Image (tube, rainbow, N blue to C red):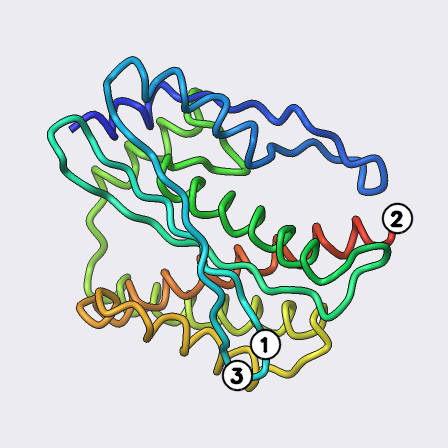
Amino acid sequence: MTLSQIQFELKAPKSQFNKFGHYAYRSNDDILKAAKPLLKKYGDNLSLTDEPVLVGDWHYIKATAKFTDKDGKETTVTGYARESVSKKGMDDSQITGTASSYARKYALNGLFLIDDTKDADTSEYHQQNQQRQTSKPSSKQQGNNLTVNANRYKTLVNKYAKIAGSSFDAVNKDVKGIMESDQSNKQLSKNDYLKKSIGLVESMLKSAKQMQQEEQAG
């Protein structure tokens, strides 16, 4: 399977710049532009689809990135972004389109292992991977990790709730609803389930922050 090779070779620099937030970022189009030559090189296929989902009282766009290698083996990754209640200068279809773009970006990030803090060709990235592969946590460490992850999850949910003008319980309910909609999550250990929930909230938080900054800039 060539997905691992594409994950290694793909380079999608942060070519966009947010003047209001003063930070560089990569867009959905940047990732696709970097991926297309590699897909052609190895004879693989990538498709992106969207699905609106209602979680609690909020509308989300669920984007699915499906990678199919030349032998027909498929790998799918999903990403979520919540639609804004309103956005300055945008009609309803544009609001949905913006959420779709964010959701697709996070699905592609997960598929191609794109890290917004460390790119895959840096020495720090390889050092982190090596540490993960060579270290095996003890039972005590695993217990500590569960506590650390639980606290991190609570912190992230509270941050998202504050930006979204919601509450911890409401956001927590939304996250559980999204996680439970994916049957494969039921097979995860408690800690892995928690880590995946953290990743979901991080994606939601990044999307909400970026949309908030763009609204302020507009």
Q: How many marks?
A: 3
Q: Which residue is mark 1?
A: 58
Residue 187 to residue 199: above or below: below
Give the mark nearer the N terminus: 3 vs 2: 3
Alpha carbons under labels 2 and 1: distance apart: 24 Å
Question: At 50% across and 30% down in the image, what residue appears?
Answer: 31
Q: CA distance from mark 1 to mark 3?
A: 6 Å
Identity of the residue drawn at 26% across and 72% down = 190
Which class describes the residues within 10 Å of circle 3: few (<14), some (14-19), or many (20+)?
few
Which residue in the structure is indicated by mark 3?
Answer: 56
Q: Residues within 10 Å of mark 2 (few under 14, many from 20)?
A: few
Image location (x, y in percent) of residue 89: 85, 54
Cα distance in 3D space between marks 3 and 2: 29 Å
As displayed, is residue 47 above or below residue 97? above
Q: Say what amino acid the circle numbered 3 marks.
A: Gly
Query: Do residues under tags 1 and 3 come within 8 Å of each other at their CB atoms?
Result: yes
List the residue tagged with mark 2. Answer: 218
Sequence-first disc among 2 and 1: 1
Task: Please provide percent x and percent y for residue 25.
Answer: 65, 34
- Quadrant for the N terminus, please: top left
